[in-house]
Image (tube, helix red, strand yellow):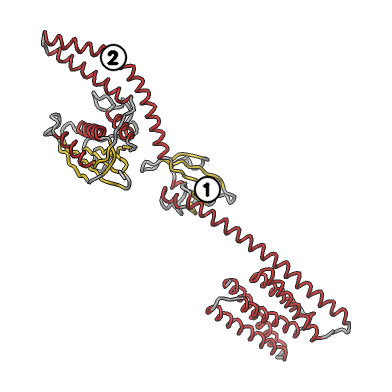
Amino acid sequence: MTERVQRYNVGRFVVALGILVVTAAESLQDGYSADDLHFFQLSAVQLLVLVISALWMRLRHPGPGFLGMMFLVDVAGASLLSAWTGGPGSLLVYLYFPVIAAGAYLLGRGGAIAVSVLSGAGLMLVAVAEGPTDGNLLLAYWEVGFRVLSFVLVGILSGELAESLERAGKALQVQRVASETVLERVRAGVLILGPTDVVSELNPSGRLLLGDVTGKRVTDVFRGSVHHRAWEEERPDGRRLVCSQATLPDHGRVIVVEDVTELWAMRERAQRDERLVATGQLAAGLAHEVRNPLAALTAILQMLREDRPSRHLELAIGEAQRLNRLVEDFLTASRAPSIHPIPLDLDGLVATVVEAFGQDPRFAGKLEVVTRLMPAPASVDPDRIRQVLWNLLTNAAQAMPGGGQIDVDMGVEGEEVVLRVRDRGVGVPIEDRERIFDPFYTRRAGGTGLGLAVVDQLVRAHQGSISVHAPEGGGTCFAVRLPLAR
Protein backbone atom coordinates (compact mmCIF):
# COMPACT_ATOMS: atom_id res chain seq x y z
CA MET A 1 0.00 0.00 0.00
CA THR A 2 2.79 2.44 0.87
CA GLU A 3 4.39 1.99 -2.56
CA ARG A 4 1.07 2.68 -4.27
CA VAL A 5 0.51 5.85 -2.24
CA GLN A 6 4.03 6.97 -3.15
CA ARG A 7 3.30 6.45 -6.85
CA TYR A 8 0.07 8.46 -6.51
CA ASN A 9 1.93 11.24 -4.73
CA VAL A 10 4.34 11.42 -7.64
CA GLY A 11 1.37 11.89 -9.96
CA ARG A 12 -0.08 14.57 -7.70
CA PHE A 13 3.27 16.35 -7.65
CA VAL A 14 3.45 16.35 -11.45
CA VAL A 15 -0.10 17.79 -11.70
CA ALA A 16 0.57 20.50 -9.09
CA LEU A 17 3.88 21.40 -10.71
CA GLY A 18 2.20 21.53 -14.12
CA ILE A 19 -0.51 23.89 -12.87
CA LEU A 20 2.17 26.06 -11.28
CA VAL A 21 4.23 26.22 -14.48
CA VAL A 22 1.22 26.96 -16.70
CA THR A 23 0.03 29.70 -14.34
CA ALA A 24 3.47 31.29 -14.21
CA ALA A 25 3.77 31.20 -18.01
CA GLU A 26 0.34 32.80 -18.43
CA SER A 27 1.19 35.47 -15.87
CA LEU A 28 4.35 36.36 -17.71
CA GLN A 29 2.50 36.57 -21.02
CA ASP A 30 -0.77 38.31 -20.06
CA GLY A 31 0.11 39.97 -16.79
CA TYR A 32 -0.59 39.08 -13.20
CA SER A 33 -4.25 38.69 -12.07
CA ALA A 34 -6.29 37.73 -9.01
CA ASP A 35 -7.05 34.27 -10.48
CA ASP A 36 -3.32 33.70 -10.90
CA LEU A 37 -2.91 34.36 -7.19
CA HIS A 38 -5.52 31.72 -6.45
CA PHE A 39 -3.69 29.26 -8.64
CA PHE A 40 -0.37 29.98 -6.98
CA GLN A 41 -1.92 29.63 -3.56
CA LEU A 42 -3.59 26.30 -4.47
CA SER A 43 -0.36 24.92 -5.96
CA ALA A 44 1.54 25.94 -2.84
CA VAL A 45 -1.05 24.27 -0.60
CA GLN A 46 -0.95 21.11 -2.76
CA LEU A 47 2.85 20.93 -2.58
CA LEU A 48 2.71 21.51 1.18
CA VAL A 49 0.19 18.67 1.51
CA LEU A 50 2.53 16.44 -0.52
CA VAL A 51 5.44 17.22 1.82
CA ILE A 52 3.29 16.51 4.88
CA SER A 53 2.07 13.26 3.27
CA ALA A 54 5.63 12.12 2.56
CA LEU A 55 6.73 12.87 6.12
CA TRP A 56 3.67 11.08 7.52
CA MET A 57 4.39 7.93 5.53
CA ARG A 58 7.96 7.87 6.80
CA LEU A 59 6.64 7.77 10.36
CA ARG A 60 3.47 5.70 10.04
CA HIS A 61 1.75 3.31 7.68
CA PRO A 62 -0.96 5.09 5.61
CA GLY A 63 -4.31 3.96 7.02
CA PRO A 64 -7.92 4.54 5.86
CA GLY A 65 -8.14 7.88 7.69
CA PHE A 66 -5.02 9.19 6.00
CA LEU A 67 -6.23 8.06 2.56
CA GLY A 68 -9.67 9.59 3.14
CA MET A 69 -8.15 12.94 4.07
CA MET A 70 -5.86 12.77 1.01
CA PHE A 71 -8.78 12.20 -1.38
CA LEU A 72 -10.83 14.93 0.34
CA VAL A 73 -8.01 17.40 -0.28
CA ASP A 74 -7.71 16.31 -3.94
CA VAL A 75 -11.46 16.59 -4.57
CA ALA A 76 -11.47 20.02 -2.91
CA GLY A 77 -8.57 21.09 -5.11
CA ALA A 78 -10.32 19.88 -8.29
CA SER A 79 -13.49 21.69 -7.18
CA LEU A 80 -11.67 25.00 -6.56
CA LEU A 81 -9.89 24.79 -9.91
CA SER A 82 -13.21 24.12 -11.65
CA ALA A 83 -14.88 27.02 -9.80
CA TRP A 84 -12.08 29.46 -10.77
CA THR A 85 -12.08 28.44 -14.44
CA GLY A 86 -15.73 28.49 -15.37
CA GLY A 87 -17.63 26.27 -12.99
CA PRO A 88 -19.14 22.91 -14.06
CA GLY A 89 -18.40 23.67 -17.72
CA SER A 90 -14.66 24.07 -17.14
CA LEU A 91 -12.20 21.72 -18.79
CA LEU A 92 -10.53 21.23 -15.41
CA VAL A 93 -13.60 19.23 -14.33
CA TYR A 94 -11.75 16.29 -15.88
CA LEU A 95 -9.29 16.45 -12.97
CA TYR A 96 -11.90 14.54 -10.97
CA PHE A 97 -11.37 11.42 -13.11
CA PRO A 98 -7.71 10.79 -12.13
CA VAL A 99 -8.74 11.17 -8.48
CA ILE A 100 -11.52 8.57 -8.96
CA ALA A 101 -9.08 6.22 -10.72
CA ALA A 102 -6.65 6.68 -7.83
CA GLY A 103 -9.45 5.70 -5.44
CA ALA A 104 -9.88 2.45 -7.35
CA TYR A 105 -6.11 1.91 -7.42
CA LEU A 106 -5.67 2.43 -3.68
CA LEU A 107 -9.01 1.36 -2.17
CA GLY A 108 -10.62 -0.99 -4.70
CA ARG A 109 -14.19 -0.82 -5.97
CA GLY A 110 -15.68 0.54 -2.74
CA GLY A 111 -13.08 3.29 -2.57
CA ALA A 112 -13.64 4.24 -6.22
CA ILE A 113 -17.40 4.59 -5.70
CA ALA A 114 -16.88 6.61 -2.51
CA VAL A 115 -14.44 8.99 -4.25
CA SER A 116 -16.78 9.31 -7.24
CA VAL A 117 -19.70 10.24 -4.96
CA LEU A 118 -17.44 12.73 -3.15
CA SER A 119 -16.40 14.18 -6.53
CA GLY A 120 -20.04 14.47 -7.58
CA ALA A 121 -20.85 16.30 -4.36
CA GLY A 122 -17.92 18.65 -4.96
CA LEU A 123 -19.08 19.40 -8.51
CA MET A 124 -22.63 20.03 -7.31
CA LEU A 125 -21.33 22.51 -4.73
CA VAL A 126 -19.44 24.27 -7.50
CA ALA A 127 -22.64 24.39 -9.59
CA VAL A 128 -24.67 25.80 -6.70
CA ALA A 129 -22.02 28.37 -5.91
CA GLU A 130 -21.66 29.49 -9.53
CA GLY A 131 -25.35 29.35 -10.47
CA PRO A 132 -26.58 29.02 -14.07
CA THR A 133 -24.50 31.13 -16.46
CA ASP A 134 -26.98 31.27 -19.38
CA GLY A 135 -30.24 31.55 -17.42
CA ASN A 136 -31.38 28.01 -18.28
CA LEU A 137 -31.51 26.39 -14.86
CA LEU A 138 -32.79 23.02 -16.09
CA LEU A 139 -30.10 22.62 -18.74
CA ALA A 140 -27.38 23.64 -16.29
CA TYR A 141 -28.39 21.12 -13.68
CA TRP A 142 -28.96 18.45 -16.34
CA GLU A 143 -25.33 18.93 -17.41
CA VAL A 144 -24.16 18.71 -13.80
CA GLY A 145 -26.25 15.59 -13.19
CA PHE A 146 -24.83 13.96 -16.32
CA ARG A 147 -21.31 14.63 -15.17
CA VAL A 148 -22.04 13.33 -11.67
CA LEU A 149 -23.45 10.17 -13.25
CA SER A 150 -20.31 9.83 -15.35
CA PHE A 151 -18.25 10.12 -12.14
CA VAL A 152 -20.19 7.23 -10.59
CA LEU A 153 -19.93 5.09 -13.73
CA VAL A 154 -16.19 5.73 -13.97
CA GLY A 155 -15.87 4.82 -10.29
CA ILE A 156 -17.76 1.54 -10.76
CA LEU A 157 -15.85 0.57 -13.90
CA SER A 158 -12.44 1.53 -12.54
CA GLY A 159 -13.23 -0.30 -9.28
CA GLU A 160 -14.19 -3.45 -11.16
CA LEU A 161 -11.05 -3.19 -13.25
CA ALA A 162 -8.87 -2.62 -10.18
CA GLU A 163 -10.35 -5.63 -8.38
CA SER A 164 -9.98 -7.79 -11.49
CA LEU A 165 -6.34 -6.80 -11.74
CA GLU A 166 -5.90 -7.46 -8.02
CA ARG A 167 -7.39 -10.94 -8.34
CA ALA A 168 -5.31 -11.67 -11.42
CA GLY A 169 -2.19 -10.46 -9.62
CA LYS A 170 -2.90 -12.64 -6.59
CA ALA A 171 -3.61 -15.67 -8.78
CA LEU A 172 -0.40 -15.02 -10.71
CA GLN A 173 1.53 -14.67 -7.44
CA VAL A 174 0.08 -17.94 -6.14
CA GLN A 175 0.95 -19.67 -9.40
CA ARG A 176 4.44 -18.22 -9.35
CA VAL A 177 5.02 -19.34 -5.74
CA ALA A 178 3.70 -22.81 -6.60
CA SER A 179 5.95 -23.01 -9.66
CA GLU A 180 8.99 -21.86 -7.69
CA THR A 181 8.19 -24.37 -4.93
CA VAL A 182 7.90 -27.19 -7.47
CA LEU A 183 11.15 -26.19 -9.14
CA GLU A 184 12.91 -26.05 -5.78
CA ARG A 185 11.57 -29.40 -4.58
CA VAL A 186 11.76 -31.42 -7.81
CA ARG A 187 14.75 -33.73 -7.98
CA ALA A 188 15.30 -33.13 -11.69
CA GLY A 189 17.37 -30.19 -12.86
CA VAL A 190 15.46 -27.54 -14.81
CA LEU A 191 17.26 -25.04 -17.04
CA ILE A 192 15.51 -22.08 -18.70
CA LEU A 193 17.22 -20.85 -21.88
CA GLY A 194 16.61 -17.55 -23.64
CA PRO A 195 16.34 -17.10 -27.41
CA THR A 196 20.16 -16.88 -27.59
CA ASP A 197 20.55 -20.34 -25.95
CA VAL A 198 22.05 -18.84 -22.79
CA VAL A 199 20.99 -20.31 -19.44
CA SER A 200 18.91 -17.63 -17.72
CA GLU A 201 17.44 -19.62 -14.80
CA LEU A 202 18.47 -22.77 -12.95
CA ASN A 203 16.74 -24.58 -10.09
CA PRO A 204 18.66 -25.94 -7.04
CA SER A 205 18.68 -29.54 -8.32
CA GLY A 206 20.15 -28.38 -11.62
CA ARG A 207 22.83 -26.48 -9.71
CA LEU A 208 23.72 -29.65 -7.80
CA LEU A 209 23.93 -31.70 -11.00
CA LEU A 210 25.72 -29.21 -13.26
CA GLY A 211 27.12 -26.50 -11.00
CA ASP A 212 26.25 -22.84 -11.39
CA VAL A 213 25.93 -22.60 -15.20
CA THR A 214 23.77 -19.45 -15.24
CA GLY A 215 24.89 -17.17 -18.06
CA LYS A 216 26.63 -19.94 -20.03
CA ARG A 217 25.67 -21.13 -23.48
CA VAL A 218 23.98 -24.50 -23.64
CA THR A 219 26.74 -25.93 -25.84
CA ASP A 220 29.23 -25.14 -23.07
CA VAL A 221 27.11 -27.01 -20.51
CA PHE A 222 26.29 -30.20 -22.42
CA ARG A 223 28.41 -32.27 -24.73
CA GLY A 224 25.51 -34.21 -26.27
CA SER A 225 23.17 -33.42 -29.14
CA VAL A 226 21.54 -30.37 -27.59
CA HIS A 227 19.37 -29.80 -30.67
CA HIS A 228 17.56 -33.12 -30.24
CA ARG A 229 14.45 -33.53 -28.12
CA ALA A 230 16.26 -35.98 -25.82
CA TRP A 231 19.81 -37.19 -25.32
CA GLU A 232 22.11 -38.82 -22.77
CA GLU A 233 25.12 -37.31 -21.05
CA GLU A 234 27.98 -38.96 -19.19
CA ARG A 235 29.68 -36.47 -16.89
CA PRO A 236 33.41 -36.54 -16.12
CA ASP A 237 32.64 -37.75 -12.58
CA GLY A 238 30.90 -40.85 -13.96
CA ARG A 239 27.29 -39.74 -13.45
CA ARG A 240 24.80 -40.50 -16.21
CA LEU A 241 22.23 -37.87 -17.11
CA VAL A 242 19.16 -38.05 -19.31
CA CYS A 243 18.16 -34.70 -20.84
CA SER A 244 14.96 -33.66 -22.58
CA GLN A 245 13.84 -30.28 -23.82
CA ALA A 246 10.84 -28.34 -25.09
CA THR A 247 10.36 -24.99 -26.80
CA LEU A 248 8.93 -22.02 -24.91
CA PRO A 249 6.54 -19.42 -26.42
CA ASP A 250 9.26 -16.73 -26.36
CA HIS A 251 11.47 -18.92 -28.59
CA GLY A 252 13.50 -20.00 -25.60
CA ARG A 253 13.85 -23.55 -24.32
CA VAL A 254 13.42 -25.49 -21.10
CA ILE A 255 15.75 -28.45 -20.50
CA VAL A 256 14.99 -31.09 -17.87
CA VAL A 257 17.98 -33.07 -16.58
CA GLU A 258 17.60 -36.28 -14.58
CA ASP A 259 20.35 -38.19 -12.82
CA VAL A 260 19.89 -41.87 -13.79
CA THR A 261 23.17 -43.12 -12.36
CA GLU A 262 21.38 -45.27 -9.77
CA LEU A 263 19.00 -46.62 -12.42
CA TRP A 264 21.96 -47.59 -14.59
CA ALA A 265 23.56 -49.29 -11.60
CA MET A 266 20.31 -51.15 -10.89
CA ARG A 267 20.11 -52.23 -14.51
CA GLU A 268 23.71 -53.43 -14.44
CA ARG A 269 23.02 -55.35 -11.23
CA ALA A 270 19.96 -56.92 -12.83
CA GLN A 271 22.01 -57.92 -15.87
CA ARG A 272 24.66 -59.31 -13.54
CA ASP A 273 22.01 -61.30 -11.71
CA GLU A 274 20.80 -62.69 -15.03
CA ARG A 275 24.32 -63.77 -15.85
CA LEU A 276 24.59 -65.35 -12.41
CA VAL A 277 21.43 -67.31 -13.11
CA ALA A 278 22.94 -68.52 -16.36
CA THR A 279 26.10 -69.35 -14.44
CA GLY A 280 24.07 -71.37 -11.95
CA GLN A 281 22.47 -73.38 -14.69
CA LEU A 282 25.87 -74.06 -16.22
CA ALA A 283 27.34 -74.92 -12.82
CA ALA A 284 24.52 -77.37 -12.10
CA GLY A 285 25.15 -79.09 -15.41
CA LEU A 286 28.87 -79.20 -14.75
CA ALA A 287 28.28 -80.61 -11.27
CA HIS A 288 26.24 -83.48 -12.69
CA GLU A 289 28.40 -84.15 -15.73
CA VAL A 290 31.92 -83.50 -14.45
CA ARG A 291 32.08 -83.86 -10.71
CA ASN A 292 31.47 -87.59 -10.40
CA PRO A 293 33.82 -88.64 -13.25
CA LEU A 294 36.41 -86.19 -11.92
CA ALA A 295 36.22 -87.70 -8.44
CA ALA A 296 36.69 -91.18 -9.91
CA LEU A 297 39.61 -89.99 -12.04
CA THR A 298 41.28 -88.34 -9.03
CA ALA A 299 40.91 -91.52 -6.98
CA ILE A 300 42.46 -93.62 -9.76
CA LEU A 301 45.39 -91.23 -10.10
CA GLN A 302 46.01 -91.32 -6.37
CA MET A 303 46.02 -95.16 -6.43
CA LEU A 304 48.50 -95.15 -9.30
CA ARG A 305 50.69 -92.71 -7.39
CA GLU A 306 50.81 -95.10 -4.43
CA ASP A 307 51.95 -97.93 -6.70
CA ARG A 308 54.21 -95.98 -9.01
CA PRO A 309 55.07 -92.51 -7.69
CA SER A 310 56.12 -90.11 -10.44
CA ARG A 311 56.20 -86.41 -11.18
CA HIS A 312 53.71 -86.79 -14.01
CA LEU A 313 51.14 -88.35 -11.70
CA GLU A 314 51.65 -85.51 -9.20
CA LEU A 315 50.97 -83.01 -11.97
CA ALA A 316 47.88 -84.89 -13.09
CA ILE A 317 46.51 -85.08 -9.54
CA GLY A 318 47.16 -81.34 -9.07
CA GLU A 319 45.27 -80.52 -12.26
CA ALA A 320 42.41 -82.78 -11.26
CA GLN A 321 42.21 -81.03 -7.90
CA ARG A 322 42.24 -77.64 -9.66
CA LEU A 323 39.35 -78.74 -11.82
CA ASN A 324 37.52 -79.84 -8.68
CA ARG A 325 38.05 -76.39 -7.13
CA LEU A 326 36.75 -74.80 -10.33
CA VAL A 327 33.58 -76.85 -10.06
CA GLU A 328 33.22 -75.82 -6.43
CA ASP A 329 33.56 -72.16 -7.44
CA PHE A 330 30.88 -72.69 -10.06
CA LEU A 331 28.56 -74.14 -7.46
CA THR A 332 29.26 -71.30 -5.02
CA ALA A 333 28.51 -68.65 -7.65
CA SER A 334 25.33 -70.40 -8.77
CA ARG A 335 23.69 -70.67 -5.36
CA ALA A 336 22.12 -67.80 -3.47
CA PRO A 337 24.36 -67.46 -0.42
CA SER A 338 22.80 -68.19 2.95
CA ILE A 339 23.99 -65.89 5.71
CA HIS A 340 23.56 -66.05 9.47
CA PRO A 341 24.25 -62.52 10.74
CA ILE A 342 25.20 -61.74 14.29
CA PRO A 343 26.02 -58.33 15.84
CA LEU A 344 29.75 -57.69 16.24
CA ASP A 345 32.46 -55.06 15.84
CA LEU A 346 34.04 -55.51 12.44
CA ASP A 347 37.41 -54.07 13.43
CA GLY A 348 38.31 -57.19 15.41
CA LEU A 349 37.20 -59.50 12.59
CA VAL A 350 39.17 -57.52 10.00
CA ALA A 351 42.29 -57.51 12.18
CA THR A 352 42.10 -61.30 12.56
CA VAL A 353 41.75 -61.87 8.81
CA VAL A 354 44.62 -59.50 8.02
CA GLU A 355 46.86 -61.26 10.54
CA ALA A 356 46.07 -64.67 9.04
CA PHE A 357 46.63 -63.36 5.52
CA GLY A 358 50.06 -62.04 6.51
CA GLN A 359 51.09 -65.60 7.45
CA ASP A 360 50.06 -67.08 4.09
CA PRO A 361 53.25 -68.69 2.71
CA ARG A 362 52.42 -67.45 -0.80
CA PHE A 363 52.73 -63.81 0.24
CA ALA A 364 54.77 -63.85 3.46
CA GLY A 365 57.77 -61.57 3.18
CA LYS A 366 56.54 -59.97 -0.06
CA LEU A 367 53.62 -57.89 1.13
CA GLU A 368 53.01 -55.38 3.88
CA VAL A 369 49.42 -54.89 4.99
CA VAL A 370 48.81 -51.53 6.68
CA THR A 371 45.56 -51.19 8.59
CA ARG A 372 43.66 -48.16 9.86
CA LEU A 373 40.61 -49.48 11.67
CA MET A 374 37.90 -47.84 13.73
CA PRO A 375 35.22 -49.58 15.82
CA ALA A 376 32.32 -50.28 13.49
CA PRO A 377 29.32 -52.26 14.78
CA ALA A 378 27.48 -54.28 12.16
CA SER A 379 25.22 -57.30 11.88
CA VAL A 380 27.03 -59.70 9.53
CA ASP A 381 27.87 -63.33 8.95
CA PRO A 382 31.50 -63.56 10.17
CA ASP A 383 32.41 -66.47 7.88
CA ARG A 384 31.04 -64.72 4.80
CA ILE A 385 32.78 -61.43 5.63
CA ARG A 386 36.04 -63.33 6.16
CA GLN A 387 35.57 -64.80 2.70
CA VAL A 388 34.92 -61.34 1.23
CA LEU A 389 37.99 -59.77 2.84
CA TRP A 390 40.24 -62.73 2.05
CA ASN A 391 39.25 -62.63 -1.63
CA LEU A 392 39.88 -58.87 -1.78
CA LEU A 393 43.29 -59.26 -0.12
CA THR A 394 44.19 -62.11 -2.46
CA ASN A 395 43.08 -60.06 -5.46
CA ALA A 396 45.23 -57.13 -4.25
CA ALA A 397 48.25 -59.40 -3.73
CA GLN A 398 47.87 -60.91 -7.22
CA ALA A 399 47.81 -57.38 -8.68
CA MET A 400 51.36 -56.89 -7.26
CA PRO A 401 53.36 -60.02 -8.24
CA GLY A 402 56.58 -58.37 -7.10
CA GLY A 403 55.18 -57.45 -3.71
CA GLY A 404 54.21 -54.10 -2.22
CA GLN A 405 51.85 -52.50 0.25
CA ILE A 406 48.14 -53.15 0.79
CA ASP A 407 46.10 -50.59 2.73
CA VAL A 408 43.04 -51.73 4.67
CA ASP A 409 40.90 -48.87 6.03
CA MET A 410 37.61 -49.14 7.86
CA GLY A 411 35.35 -46.55 9.43
CA VAL A 412 31.81 -45.25 9.70
CA GLU A 413 30.34 -42.87 7.11
CA GLY A 414 26.79 -41.80 7.84
CA GLU A 415 24.67 -44.91 8.26
CA GLU A 416 27.24 -47.26 6.68
CA VAL A 417 30.38 -49.14 7.60
CA VAL A 418 32.94 -48.63 4.83
CA LEU A 419 35.80 -51.10 4.34
CA ARG A 420 38.43 -50.18 1.75
CA VAL A 421 41.16 -52.43 0.39
CA ARG A 422 43.76 -50.71 -1.80
CA ASP A 423 46.72 -52.09 -3.69
CA ARG A 424 49.58 -50.39 -5.54
CA GLY A 425 49.30 -52.55 -8.66
CA VAL A 426 48.72 -51.72 -12.29
CA GLY A 427 45.10 -50.74 -11.68
CA VAL A 428 41.91 -51.57 -13.56
CA PRO A 429 41.17 -49.78 -16.85
CA ILE A 430 37.98 -47.70 -16.93
CA GLU A 431 36.41 -49.91 -19.59
CA ASP A 432 36.87 -52.98 -17.35
CA ARG A 433 35.42 -51.56 -14.13
CA GLU A 434 31.83 -52.13 -15.17
CA ARG A 435 32.49 -55.82 -15.88
CA ILE A 436 34.95 -56.66 -13.13
CA PHE A 437 32.23 -58.23 -10.97
CA ASP A 438 30.80 -60.29 -13.83
CA PRO A 439 31.17 -64.10 -13.57
CA PHE A 440 34.04 -65.55 -15.61
CA TYR A 441 35.46 -62.14 -16.41
CA THR A 442 39.15 -61.95 -15.53
CA ARG A 443 42.27 -60.20 -16.78
CA ARG A 444 44.65 -62.52 -14.94
CA ALA A 445 46.08 -65.57 -16.65
CA GLY A 446 44.87 -68.74 -14.94
CA GLY A 447 42.03 -66.97 -13.11
CA THR A 448 38.46 -68.26 -13.13
CA GLY A 449 36.75 -64.86 -12.98
CA LEU A 450 34.55 -65.97 -10.08
CA GLY A 451 36.31 -64.50 -7.04
CA LEU A 452 34.98 -60.95 -7.33
CA ALA A 453 31.59 -62.21 -8.55
CA VAL A 454 31.26 -64.21 -5.32
CA VAL A 455 32.41 -61.18 -3.29
CA ASP A 456 29.74 -59.00 -4.92
CA GLN A 457 27.10 -61.66 -4.28
CA LEU A 458 28.03 -62.00 -0.60
CA VAL A 459 28.12 -58.23 -0.03
CA ARG A 460 24.68 -57.76 -1.61
CA ALA A 461 23.35 -60.61 0.52
CA HIS A 462 24.23 -58.37 3.51
CA GLN A 463 22.21 -55.48 1.93
CA GLY A 464 25.48 -53.76 1.10
CA SER A 465 27.35 -52.68 -2.02
CA ILE A 466 30.85 -52.83 -3.46
CA SER A 467 32.54 -50.46 -5.86
CA VAL A 468 35.95 -50.02 -7.45
CA HIS A 469 37.87 -46.90 -8.38
CA ALA A 470 41.39 -45.76 -9.15
CA PRO A 471 42.80 -43.63 -6.28
CA GLU A 472 45.42 -40.95 -6.69
CA GLY A 473 48.88 -42.46 -6.86
CA GLY A 474 47.84 -45.51 -8.87
CA GLY A 475 46.56 -48.94 -8.02
CA THR A 476 43.03 -50.08 -7.32
CA CYS A 477 40.71 -49.51 -4.36
CA PHE A 478 37.69 -51.69 -3.56
CA ALA A 479 35.11 -50.13 -1.19
CA VAL A 480 32.65 -52.39 0.62
CA ARG A 481 29.66 -50.63 2.23
CA LEU A 482 27.57 -52.43 4.84
CA PRO A 483 24.62 -51.14 6.90
CA LEU A 484 25.59 -49.83 10.32
CA ALA A 485 24.07 -51.82 13.19
CA ARG A 486 21.47 -49.82 15.15
Left-right relation of 375 to 152: left
**Quadrant in the rendering for residue 161:** bottom right
Rendered position, 130 above or below 203:
below
Q: Residue 421, how many percent across, how many down? A: 24, 39
For disc 2, the marked residue is: 290
**Quadrant in the rendering for residue 434:** top left
> Label 2 crowding class (10 Å Cα cut-off): few <14, some 14-19, many 20+?
some
Left-right relation of 385 to 187: left
Q: Residue 46, how many percent across, how many down? A: 64, 83
Nearer mark to the viewer, of 2 and 1: 2
How far apart marks 2 and 1 lie (CA) works out to 61 Å
Residue 416 in view of the camera: yes
Looking at the rendered structure, the number of numbered marks drawn on it comes to 2
Q: Looking at the figure, which quarter contains the N terminus?
A: bottom right
Residue 13 in view of the camera: no
Rendered position, 242 above or below 75:
above
For disc 1, the marked residue is: 254
Q: What kind of element bears circle 2?
A: helix
Which residue shows up at 81% across the image and 78% down it? Answer: 144
